[in-house]
Amino acid sequence: MFGGAFMMGAKDRLLPPAIPFRFFATAIVYHLAAWAVLLWAADGLPGYRGGLGPVLAALHLITLGVLAMTAMGAAYQMLPVATRRQLGPAWACSLSWWLFAPGVAVLSFGLADGVLWALHGGASLAIGGLALFGGLVARNLMRVSDLPAVTGPVWVALASLLAVLVLAGLLIVDVGQGFLPDRASLAAAHGVLAGYGFMGMLVMGFSAVLVPMFVLAPAIPDAQAKPVVMVAAMALAAGAGGAVLGWAWLAGLAALVGLVAALLYLRLQRRVLAARMRKRLEPFFRLLKGGWVMLPLSLLAAAILALGPWPHVSGPVWGLLLVVGWLLSFATGILQRIMPFLASMHSAARGGKPVLLSHLTAQPVLMVHAAAHAGALALLLAAIGLDSPLIARLGALCGLAGALAFAVFAIIMMVRYRAHHRSQ
């Protein structure tokens, strides 16, 4: 099957455009907020070892507000297209946004200032929104008997999400109570399962659909995808177990097994690109390729962190490589491609002439975003290595500039889309 075959009959499974674009627009707003908060808290980034405060709030604005928000909007629209099964009622998809979007804002405020009512209320809303999302996706997958290259990673992502939500609830309730015997170990397991489990496995599943579709290449063979999912699942289980039990050797081994899974996944992506019909890759692939480089580097950093040396350096470096280097690069790369793609599809679904993707995409602005994003990552890594709050502030400022450029791209896209719609 070619990647483009996923789009056969896709118009019949399009959600109202307000649903996915509501998630995407919110992710763009939280992208700005995350970098602004990190700019405010940049002095605390070098040597950060965890704990409540604005650095943790900025982290969750990215992981929840940008990464999870983007994943929810993309999954609601692209999973029904890939599986050829309806995901669920539109009102339920909208309800998950009404729970999750304000929940992220309130929770982030609570994480920044340690306000209990905000922690409990925001976490309840965010957990409710993610739980509803997980239920809708599981309902879709239970009606699919094929496509293991897509469904396998997503099932692992949902299992990871369940564990993440349970751990998040325990960590939030523990604030002010102090009943957890080893809070740091549970927080580490929470981070592993959230980054590599929930988001990482969603990336693997989405890659099996989106990358072949965008480059016009054959889909990943199921027989090649299954072993990667199995190795990744074993690494996740070992990594979470090692973190909870405090077994450094198991956590380090899990990072190395995860590295094997990552290299197998990247080999599959390389084969897809090698077999593509569209020879010229679009500019958004620079972010995807950059993220693919950061994935194995993050696992090497995780192995170093697990083995103990320089935790004040290896800890923040691991978090940056995982969240900003891999996941945020991939999310913003896909977002800048999928937003014009869906807008063009909706313009055709209205019965008029579809708007061209090239007309909707302001490439010069996206080039500014890509350069600023890369600069922010490099500066923040340097700030950690040199223990320099000034360089950290410059890195956060660079990230904020990139987020502003990305927001300008989204505004230009919507203005051009509406102008095209009015002209029909």
Image: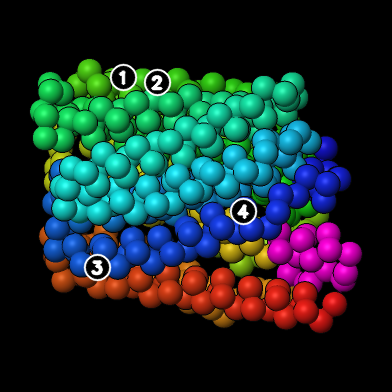
Tell me the crowding category of disc 4: few under 14, some 14 to 19, or many 20 or more residues within 10 angstroms, Cα based. many
Which amino acid is tagged 1? Answer: Gly
Q: Quadrant of the C terminus?
A: bottom right
* CA–CA distance in space, label 4 to label 1: 35 Å
Q: Can you see residue 56? A: no
Identify the residue shown where x is 39% and y is 42%: 126
Q: Which mark is residue 241?
A: 1
Question: Which residue shows up at 64% across the image and 58% down it?
Answer: 18
Disc 2 to disc 1, C-alpha distance: 6 Å
Residue mark closest to the camera, 2 vs 4:
4
Highlighted magenta segment, given as a residue range: 341-357
Q: Is residue 139 left or right of residue 197?
A: right
Of marks 2 and 4, which one's residue comes earlier in the chain?
4
Q: Amino acid at mark 2?
A: Ala
Q: Any magenta on residue 354? A: yes
Q: Which residue is mark 3?
A: 39
**Label 2's element?**
helix
Residue 383 horizontal/vertical position (percent) = 20, 62
* Image quarter of the N terminus: top right
Q: For the residue marked with disc 3, what is the amino acid?
A: Leu
Q: Is residue 231 visible?
A: yes
Instruction: Work out whether mark 3 precedes mark 4 in sequence or the reverse, and give the earlier one.
Output: 4
Write down the residue under mark 4: 20
Please name the residue that numbered disc 2 is placed on. 237
42 left or right of 342 in image: left
**Residue 123 at x, y percent in the picture:** 32, 40
Q: Are marks 2 and 4 in contact (CB under 8 Å)?
A: no
Check contact, mark 2 vs mark 1: CB within 8 A.
Answer: yes
- CA gap between label 3 and label 2 equals 35 Å
Q: Position of residue 254 (x, y in %)?
A: 36, 25
Q: Are marks 1 and 3 in contact (CB under 8 Å)?
A: no
